[in-house]
Amino acid sequence: MIPPPNLEIAVLVLGVVILMFEAFLKNVDKRALAYAAIGGLTAVLIATWFLGPSPIVDQASGFWSFYTADPLSIFFKRFALITTILVTIMMIDYAPESTSSFALGEFFALPIFTCAGLMYLVSAIDFIMIFVALELVTISFYVLVGFDKNNPVSLEAGVKYLILSAVATAFLVYGITWIFGATGQTNLARVTAVLENPNAEQGGALFGAVLVLVGLGFKIAAVPFQIWVPDVYQGAPTPVTAYLSVGSKAAGFVVLFRVLKPFLMLPHMDRLIVLIALLTLIYGNLAALPQGNLKRLLAYSSIAHAGYLLIGIACVDGRAVTFYLVAYLLMTLLSFAVLIIVAKQTGERISDFDGLAKRSPFLAFAMLIAMVSLAGVPFTAGFFGKFFIFAAAIAQHQTALVVVGVITVGCGFYYYLKVVRAMYWQPTDKIDIIPVSGLSRLMISGLIVAIIWLGIYPQPILQALKR
């Protein structure tokens, strides 16, 4: 049986090996490194089903008190691995034919280091470990966002992400300092034990929790910390945008769920979460309505979905948040997978998808499934995701969240179905057939099946956390 921390070590070693091959193999097609990365990550993914009982899992003190291997963390380790594998497949389609100024080995290796950071992050139960893992993820994204050195828009996005992320990190560290000062602890379980004492210093802990919420709010693109999202999403290489939208957001919400639990007992903390959720829902959906660029539309859509996930956080419903994140993974990666292939032929605007059903019925159908699932149409994973979120809000009597959530879902139908209208009803003079590689076709088909399957039978995800 495999001790849990060995998985992260294996992923880090894989990333280093890919970088070594990039540095010393000059006459080899660097796309082979992507297939090696996919194979290595798949092996680690398979190994997650052979995790054995470890003293690290149950140890409450000592060196390993910063790390847990509970069902939630193991589930999201698999989530991070699957996301990285799918994004790497997208990178193969995105990578330019001419690689003279595009270091493909580094392009394929950086997501592996990001994956290791995400895996550490979902197991972190100590503020120090949360900070270290979060920085490993963020620094990798600094490089990936601005990776295309010949594209000034990508460089601008990288600078914006670097500066604003550094500010968010400062808030996070300052918040951790206040929490440590108020409680004398950085371990989440010990912080909870201190705050349960009525004589605890609640004012300093509350202020620190708000600062930590600001730092994590940047990572999950919650209002009012979302200012970076549209420009960074539009400027970054499209596979990196998909990775930011799914992997970074999922890990951010897992950390937020763990971190906020001890502080929800403090006065007004729950109201603050509800307020941020309401603002995020309204802003994300209304800002997406006029968008004509599909990447920018998906950026504002990402903000809106952060609002729905915050409903689950406010209601402290881990099951609803987990299912929504899985549904979001499937439908967002599917939409970006199609966008990458179509954008290489035409462009990223919604008008570039005009008549796609005639040029590539397979890609048009895939984007149709992605859009209707993002909108929340029944018999898709997106429908059940919203259903569980709203059910949690109703159970907690959060009337304002339910009302605003249902209204904003209507907004989502409008801007998602604009893409469907362009593909199936808008005329076009483009007649070129859009080629799809075998690996991409397999990935897209798998995502379509998964979205429809979970829209009919959601039990596998709901039961996974109990194992």
Image (cartoon, helix red, strand yellow):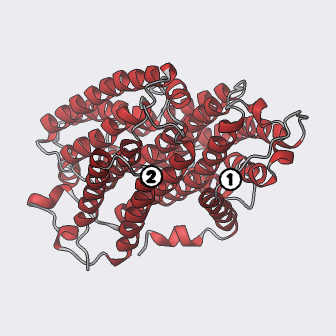
The answer, for residue 258, to whether it is visible in the render is no
The quarter of the picture where the N terminus appears is bottom left
Picture coordinates of residue 65 (x, y %)? Answer: 16, 58
Label number found at residue 436: 1
Q: Amino acid at mark 1?
A: Val
The quarter of the picture where the C terminus appears is bottom left
Q: How busy is the neighbourhood of tag 2: few (under 14 within 10 Å), some, or many (20 plus)?
A: many
Task: Give the vertical position of 29 relative to 2 (above or below).
Answer: above
Q: Quadrant of residue 362?
A: bottom right
Describe residue 81's horizontal placement relative to residue 296 as left or right: left
For the residues marked 1 and 2, what is the alpha-carbon distance in whole angstroms?
42 Å
Describe residue 253's horizontal placement relative to residue 245 as left or right: left
Camera-side residue: 452 or 156? 156
Q: Earlier in the sequence, mark 1 or mark 2?
A: 2
Give the residue at mark 2. 316
Query: At 91% across and 34% down in the image, what residue appears?
Result: 427
Picture coordinates of residue 281 (x, y %)? Answer: 59, 34
Camera-side residue: 190 or 106? 106
At mark 1, the secondary structure is loop
Q: Amino acid at mark 2?
A: Val
Query: At 39% across and 62% down in the image, what residue appears?
Result: 41
Picture coordinates of residue 249 (x, y %)? Answer: 45, 44
Q: Nearer the viewer, mark 1 or mark 2?
A: 1
At mark 2, the secondary structure is loop
Camera-side residue: 319 or 363? 363
Does the residue at mark 1 contact the one at mark 2 (Cβ under 8 Å)?
no
